[in-house]
């Protein structure tokens, strides 16, 4: 039942190839309109409410330039248009230059709104490729350094000058630069992890859909057998009539006999298929715990590793539940991972009580490195170290297995075996009510 790690990785690559760093134009346009509104409100309040002296004409031209650029983009492209990384960086660079120019004529780094120069950089690192974003942060640092030498005073009360000492200017520059780099790194890490998680979850949904499809093939075969029964019966009747009418005609008698025998053969095959589906339908729909585990570990007994099943509870009282492709796939992937890393043996232990059902998977391989135990289950990371990397992977298969099992109500605990024993241990536990379901009548 388990899909190989390479197959899962190929599936994830297909999902990830559809994702991109293209930003919707409407998103950027709305952010820029917000900037236009904020800048306009600030200028109006400073100039007309506080009545501070302000270069109104220059400020109005800079704000108007941003508004005109926004109107031009909205007119040339549809709202659903998506911009590539270069286009996004170019527009964010323009926004950065406009903001830096506005700060330059209103006091430079002494302006209390100077930290807003970080906003385009944060947007870039949260949504664009790293190499493009690094170009923007370099440009932002150049702009920040330039406005530090602004000859203009901060708008203040008439007759008074708000002077900023050079040491304070350096301190503000360092604060803005450090905030810019920290916020950029944080935004990049968060967005990257979110993108990886989204891609991994999409791959999980595709795997689960595939497993459900495979589980439905038995019912499809039964339906096909039922539908084909009627036309084959008609062919058989016609063949009998033809045989009676052409019995004395040697030209067609052998062909009609062949047609009749083959139609009977088809009907016999469909009859057996229908009978098999009817007899095994309940078995396919409902599985005792022992049958479920045997189905999971059976495909992995052929790789030179001893896979042992240990049942610590009485099989007579074992839970019987509905067939769940998510559980079958998830357990199969964990067993496959254990077989890949085991040296000689994998042990699967089952136990059940009136309130819970537990499955423990142990191998005698190298186990989990202590520094990565806390990160097990994260997508796109290798979870074990091994000299032979042929059994390694990106951790996506383990992530999918963990996600599917947790969706079924299980709790998973990853660790290593007891002291003195090499190897990894995974314990999966469900409330019994989730694994013991009554038959549907």
Image (tube, helix red, strand yellow):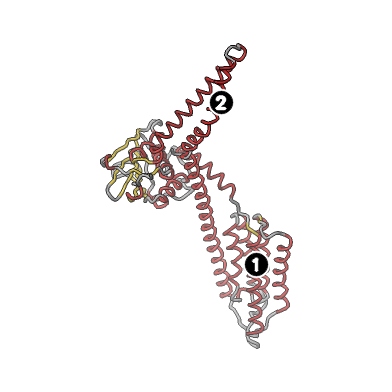
Location of residue 378 with respect to 76 vertically, above or below: above
- In this view, the residue in front, 304 or 284, is 284
- The 10 Å Cα crowd at callout 1, few under 14, some 14 to 19, many 20 or more, is some
Left or right relative to 179: residue 23: right
Say whether residue 56 is visible.
yes
Q: Choose mark 2 or mark 1, whichever is in front.
A: 2
> Considering the numbered disc 2 on the image, is that residue within a helix, a strand or a loop?
helix
- The 10 Å Cα crowd at callout 2, few under 14, some 14 to 19, many 20 or more, is some
- In this view, the residue in front, 84 or 52, is 84
| Image mark for residue 32 | 1
- Which quadrant of the structure image shows residue 345? top left
Task: Give the residue pinned by disc 2.
Answer: 235
- Residue at 60% from the left image edge and 72% from the top image edge: 114
**Image position, residue 56 (x, y; %):** 71, 79
**Separation of residues labelled 2 and 1 (CA atoms):** 72 Å
| Image mark for residue 219 | none
Location of residue 91 with respect to 261 vertically, above or below: below
**Quadrant of the image for the C terminus?**
top left
**Image position, residue 408 (x, y; %):** 40, 49
Location of residue 100 with respect to 371 vertically, above or below: below
- Residue at 46% from the left image edge and 36% from the top image edge: 218
- In this view, the residue in front, 379 or 47, is 379
**Image position, residue 237 (x, y; %):** 54, 24
- In this view, the residue in front, 327 or 172, is 327
Location of residue 282 with respect to 105 vertically, above or below: above
Say whether residue 341 is visible.
no
Mark 2–mark 1 CB contact (< 8 Å): no
> Considering the numbered disc 1 on the image, is that residue within a helix, a strand or a loop?
helix
Left or right relative to 100: residue 344: left
Q: How many marks overall?
A: 2
- Residue at 56% from the left image edge and 75% from the top image edge: 168
**Image position, residue 210 (x, y; %):** 50, 42
């Amino acid at each position: 039942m388990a899909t190989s790690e390479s197959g899962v990785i190929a599936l994830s690559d297909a999902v990830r190839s559809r994702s991109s760093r293209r930003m919707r134009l409407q998103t950027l346009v709305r952010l820029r309109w917000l900037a236009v509104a904020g800048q306009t409100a600030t200028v109006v309040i400073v100039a007309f409410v506080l009545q501070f002296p302000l270069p109104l004409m220059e400020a109005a031209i800079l704000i108007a330039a941003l508004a005109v650029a926004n109107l031009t983009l909205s007119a040339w492209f549809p709202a659903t248009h998506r911009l590539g990384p270069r286009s996004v960086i170019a527009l964010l660079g323009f926004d950065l230059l406009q903001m830096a120019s506005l700060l330059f004529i209103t006091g430079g780094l002494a302006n209390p709104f100077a930290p807003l120069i970080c906003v385009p950089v944060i947007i870039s690192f949260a949504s664009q490729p790293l190499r493009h974003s690094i170009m923007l942060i370099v440009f932002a640092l150049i702009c920040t350094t330039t406005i530090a030498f602004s000859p203009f005073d901060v708008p203040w009360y008439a007759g008074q000058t708000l002077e900023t000492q050079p040491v304070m200017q350096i301190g503000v520059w360092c604060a803005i630069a450090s905030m810019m780099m920290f916020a950029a790194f944080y935004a990049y890490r968060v967005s990257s992890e979110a993108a990886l998680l989204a891609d991994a979850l999409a791959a999980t949904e595709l795997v689960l859909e595939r497993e459900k499809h495979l589980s439905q093939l038995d019912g499809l075969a039964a339906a096909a057998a039922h539908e084909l029964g009627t036309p084959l019966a008609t062919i058989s009747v016609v063949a009998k009539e033809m045989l009676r009418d052409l019995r004395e005609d040697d030209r067609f008698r052998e062909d009609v006999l062949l047609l009749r025998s083959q139609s009977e053969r088809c009907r016999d095959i469909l009859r057996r298929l229908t009978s098999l589906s009817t007899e095994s339908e309940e078995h396919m729909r409902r599985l005792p715990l022992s049958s479920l585990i045997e189905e999971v570990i059976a495909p992995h007994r052929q790789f030179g590793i001893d896979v042992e099943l240990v049942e610590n509870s009485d099989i007579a009282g074992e839970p019987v539940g509905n067939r769940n492709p998510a559980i079958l796939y998830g357990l199969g992937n964990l067993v496959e991972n254990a077989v890949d890393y085991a040296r000689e043996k994998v042990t699967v232990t089952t136990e059940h009580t009136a309130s819970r059902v537990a499955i423990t998977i142990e191998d005698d391989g190298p186990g989990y490195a202590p520094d990565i135990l806390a990160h097990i289950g994260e997508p796109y990371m290798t979870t074990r170290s091994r000299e032979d990397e042929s059994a390694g992977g990106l951790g996506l298969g383990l992530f999918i297995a963990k996600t599917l099992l947790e969706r079924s109500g299980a709790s998973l605990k990853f660790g290593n075996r007891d002291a003195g024993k090499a190897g990894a241990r995974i314990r999966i536990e469900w409330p019994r009510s989730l694994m013991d379901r009554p038959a549907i009548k």
